[in-house]
């Protein structure tokens, strides 16, 4: 009553990746589907399948509310303890407690750490392929120490403050209607990054005694071209910094 190491590793890895990328419902479904496929194999031990299902469910439960990468260390600890207890319970249920080997114990203890390590390595590679930006990536982008946001704070401080206020308002609004508040917050933080290239042409960055409004010296058509250009400039800047598509989309869409 102990699933093979490769099966246990794949189960934990699949459950972890699908939950982080597609939320817990998909994680539970993929866990059950993988066990169902293994059940089709000839002579598949029932206890092994039960153990794999429990391991997958525990992995989904552990990662479904993850908010930062450092929590993966807690997940490793939880899953390691769970795998160890699961091994002992399965061995006891099959009447083979005395036959538990050191290899099986090491497998139970190391599988969670290996699965998490693989997941952290694969996530940045898988996200662009499936066109999904996970909450972990969004959390990293929401850090105000992001180089692009720090640059905006220096070059366009008014726009930086405006973006923070909009992000707070939008996040609260998104949470009230049950949509992805984190995604909305990050999109709002980066929606006006294109203004950095001509910061002095936007009123929030103009200060009294600094020469007045630059648009007073321009024709209306030229003013409109400069103002509208911040959308195109923002998209180009976001692509240069390799921001996810879900975040880049906020730049043109915040003007309709």
Image (cartoon, rainbow, N blue to C red):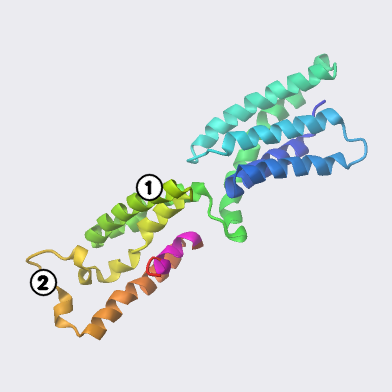
Q: Mark 2 points at which residue?
A: 212
Left or right of 34, for residue 164: left
Seen at 29% across and 68% down, the residue is 195
Instruction: Assign a secondary structure to mark 2.
Output: loop
Check residue 248 for magenta coloring. Answer: yes
Residue 101 in view in this figure:
no
- Residue 37: x %, y % from top left: 82, 44
Indicate the quadrant containing the N terminus: top left, top right, bottom left or bottom right: top right
Seen at 88% across and 42% down, the residue is 40
Residue 203 in view in this figure:
yes
Question: Which sits earlier in the primary sequence, circle 2 or circle 1?
Answer: 1
Left or right of 22, for residue 102: right
Tell me where the magenta segment starts and ends, as one range.
246-253
Left or right of 197, for residue 217: left
Compared to residue 164, the image places residue 237 above or below, namely below
- Residue 166: x %, y % from top left: 32, 55
- Occupied quadrant, residue 92: top right
Compared to residue 77, the image places residue 64 above or below, namely below
Left or right of 224, for residue 118: right
Q: Is the magenta stretch mostly helix, strand or loop?
A: helix
- Residue 239: x %, y % from top left: 45, 67
Q: Mark 1 points at which residue?
A: 172
Compared to residue 170, the image places residue 230 above or below, namely below
* Mark whose residue sits in front, 2 or 1: 1
- Per the rendering, the mark at residue 128 is none
Query: In the rendered structure, are the residues bearing label 2 and label 1 in contact, judged by CB atoms less than 8 Å apart?
Result: no
User: Closer to the camera, 113 or 51?
Assistant: 51
- Occupied quadrant, residue 211: bottom left
């Amino acid at each position: 009553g102990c699933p093979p190491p490769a099966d246990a590793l794949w189960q934990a890895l699949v459950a972890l990746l699908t939950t982080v990328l597609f939320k817990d419902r998909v994680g539970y479904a993929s866990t059950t589907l993988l066990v169902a496929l293994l059940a089709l194999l000839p002579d598949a031990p029932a206890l092994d399948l039960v153990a794999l299902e429990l391991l997958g469910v525990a992995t989904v439960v552990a990662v479904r509310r993850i908010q930062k990468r450092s929590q993966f260390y807690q997940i490793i600890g939880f899953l390691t303890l769970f795998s160890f207890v699961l091994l002992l319970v399965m061995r006891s249920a099959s009447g083979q407690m005395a036959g538990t080997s050191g290899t099986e114990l090491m497998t139970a203890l190391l599988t969670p750490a290996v699965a998490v390590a693989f997941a952290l390595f694969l996530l940045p590679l898988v996200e662009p392929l499936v066109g999904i930006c996970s909450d972990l990536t969004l959390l990293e982008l929401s850090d105000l120490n992001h180089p692009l946001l720090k640059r905006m704070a220096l070059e366009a401080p008014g726009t930086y403050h405006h973006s923070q206020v909009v992000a707070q308002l939008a996040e609260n609004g998104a949470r009230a209607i049950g949509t992805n508040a984190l995604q909305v917050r990050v999109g709002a933080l980066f929606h006006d990054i294109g203004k950095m290239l001509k910061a002095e042409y936007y009123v929030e960055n103009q200060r009294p005694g600094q020469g007045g409004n630059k648009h007073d010296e321009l024709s209306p058509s030229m003013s409109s071209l400069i103002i509208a250009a911040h959308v195109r400039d923002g998209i180009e800047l976001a692509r240069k910094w390799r921001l996810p598509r879900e975040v880049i989309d906020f730049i043109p869409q915040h003007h309709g």
